[in-house]
Amino acid sequence: MAIQTKPTDADVTAFLDAVPDERRRAEGHAMRDLFERVTGEKAVMWGPSMVGFGSYHYQGKSSSGDWFVVGFSPRKAALTIYGVYDDYGPVEPLFADLGPHETGKGCLYLKRLDAVDGDVLEQLVRRAWEKRTA
């Protein structure tokens, strides 16, 4: 069984500009800038609501497919960041310095981008990118 979410040709800027909440919309644009700077990759829409950077092939116990290396989605409940948190291994010590956040199901959830340490967030994205692309 493969994940159904795939990269699309949808316009990332149009998606981010259409985020209803003004703060979450601004956070989405800020995250795009951070991810593009760290990864050197252009943002790509994956499915209707996730912005991904790079891709890799995975083979799990019950599924396989392609997925983005790191990414995010400016969701209503929280800014959701993918690829920086792995709930199957040791917890990255930098999370202690990040600021208010939650984790779960392989995601990092931020209620407010301005409440976390931007330098620490950038290091988390960089480490996750380097781990999968080295």
Image (cartoon, grey):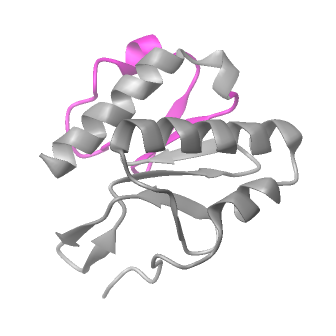
**Residue 2 pos. (x, y %):** 33, 84
Q: Which residues are magenta?
A: 86-112
**Residue 72 pos. (x, y %):** 53, 50
**Residue 107 pos. (x, y %):** 46, 46
- All told, the count of numbered labels is 0
Q: In the rendered view, does 127 fall on the left or right side of 116? A: left
Asked whether 87 falls inside the magenta stretch, the response is yes
Asked whether 129 falls inside the magenta stretch, the response is no
Against 68, is 40 above or below? above
**Is residue 84 in view from this perspective?**
no
Q: Quadrant of residue 4?
A: bottom left
Against 103, is 106 above or below? below
Residue in view at x 73 percent, y 46 percent:
77
Residue in view at x 31 percent, y 33 percent:
126
Query: Front-most of 29 and 78?
Result: 29
Q: In the rendered view, does 17 fall on the left or right side of 45? A: right
Q: Quadrant of residue 1?
A: bottom left
Query: Front-most of 6 and 30?
Result: 30
**Residue 11 pos. (x, y %):** 65, 69
Residue in view at x 82 percent, y 36 percent:
23
**Is residue 45 in view from this perspective?**
yes
Residue in view at x 57 percent, y 62 percent:
50
Q: Quadrant of residue 67?
A: bottom left
